Amino acid sequence: MGRQRIFSGVQPTGNLHLGNYLGAIRNWVEIQSQFDNFFCVVDLHAITVPHKPETLANDTHAIAALYLACGIDLNCSTIFIQSHVCAHSELTWLLNCITPLNWLQDMIQFKEKALKQGENVGVGLLDYPVLMASDILLYQTDKVPVGEDQKQHLELTRDIVNRFNHQFAKPNQPVLKLPEPLIRKEGARVMSLTDGTKKMSKSDPSELSRINLLDSPDEIAKRLSAAKLIPFAVWSLTIQNVQKVTIY
Ligand code: ATP
Ligand code: LTN
């Protein structure tokens, strides 16, 4: 039997930060030698929120370069750009046709991002998790290493697989493989430096809220000294939530 397959990705929506590294990329690097790996820069996901088309290509290449700088090894891993493989969009359409609308309306990330966008919510934002499912299912992926915020999207992907196989596959001959999330306990949800109730995020308008991988030591010191201390009660609730996620 060949090696199990890994698929994961990052959106080119800004600078990679400590959360992206500890929650995702560090884990990819650690386990890559045991798997057959596909690490994607998911540019089609990045256009589901307001963005600058003129910098998207550069931002996409910068994330790919950071994958290499963090230690992704091309001897066992493939790095590529999502929009270069049109099958991702094509499979999204097919899966759209079997995905119930209310499954997508229930996604936490959709609700949070839709709230931020006010009246300008595009259909793409709602459909984001189906595109993510297509990324994963196109490659008959076994395992998906991500941060804790992506757990619900992985559950939806598994629901789509079960529904598809139930509707279209012969008994005991599944067409789509059921992927498993890999969410490590440590670093699965690194919190914002300015609001300890929110996760660190590329798209947070405040630069002070995060530590970017390319920040200088002086910038990091400045951000840490401006960081807000969070009350113990909030911290312990956050920790309890993180401990609920799957551990490997
Ligand atoms: P955006 O703010 O544009 O939504 P993001 O900072 O949330 O971006 P993504 O590109 O959505 O980053 O996520 C890439 C990977 O990093 C995913 O596996 C995600 O779970 C993980 N990740 C993102 N933020 C954190 C965080 N604060 N702590 C741990 N993991 C994180
Ligand atoms: N939605 C993910 C990025 C992403 C992804 C994927 C992660 C898109 N397609 C496939 C794992 C597998 C996020 O981190 N925001």
Image (cartoon, rainbow, N blue to C red):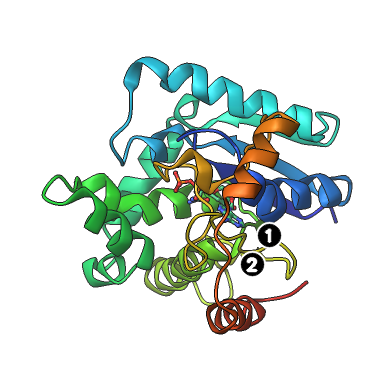
Residue 138 location (% of width, % of height): 53, 47
Q: How many residues crowd around disc 1 within 10 Å: few (fewer than 14), some, or many (20 or more)?
A: many
- Name the residue nearer the viewer: 34 or 98: 34
User: Is residue 183 positioned above or below 246 on the image?
Assistant: above
- Name the residue nearer the viewer: 64 or 199: 199
Determine the image quadrant of residue 211. Answer: top right
**Mark linked to residue 180:** 2
Determine the image quadrant of residue 90. Answer: top left
Instruction: Specify which label sits upstream in the sequence, 2 or 1.
Output: 1
How far apart marks 2 and 1 lie (CA) works out to: 5 Å
**CB atoms of marks 2 and 1 within 8 Å:** yes
Residue 97 location (% of width, % of height): 26, 57
Q: Residue furthest left?
A: 119
Residue under the point 85% across and 50% down: 30
Residue under the point 75% across and 33% down: 217
User: Is residue 206 positioned above or below 168 on the image?
Assistant: above
Would you say 127 lies left or right of 195 here?
left
Task: Identify the secondary structure beneath mark 2.
Answer: strand
**Kind of residue at badge 1:** Lys
**Mark linked to residue 25:** none
Residue labelled 1 has its Cβ within 8 Å of some atom of ligand 2: no
Q: How many residues crowd around disc 2 within 10 Å: few (fewer than 14), some, or many (20 or more)?
A: some
User: Is residue 242 positioned above or below 99 on the image?
Assistant: below
Q: Which residue is mark 1?
A: 143
**Kind of residue at badge 2:** Glu
Residue under the point 55% across and 51% down: 136
Q: Looking at the figure, which quarter contains the N terminus?
A: bottom right
Task: Identify the secondary structure beneath mark 1.
Answer: strand
- Number of numbered callouts drawn: 2
- Name the residue nearer the viewer: 243 or 145: 243
User: Is residue 186 positioned above or below 126 on the image?
Assistant: below
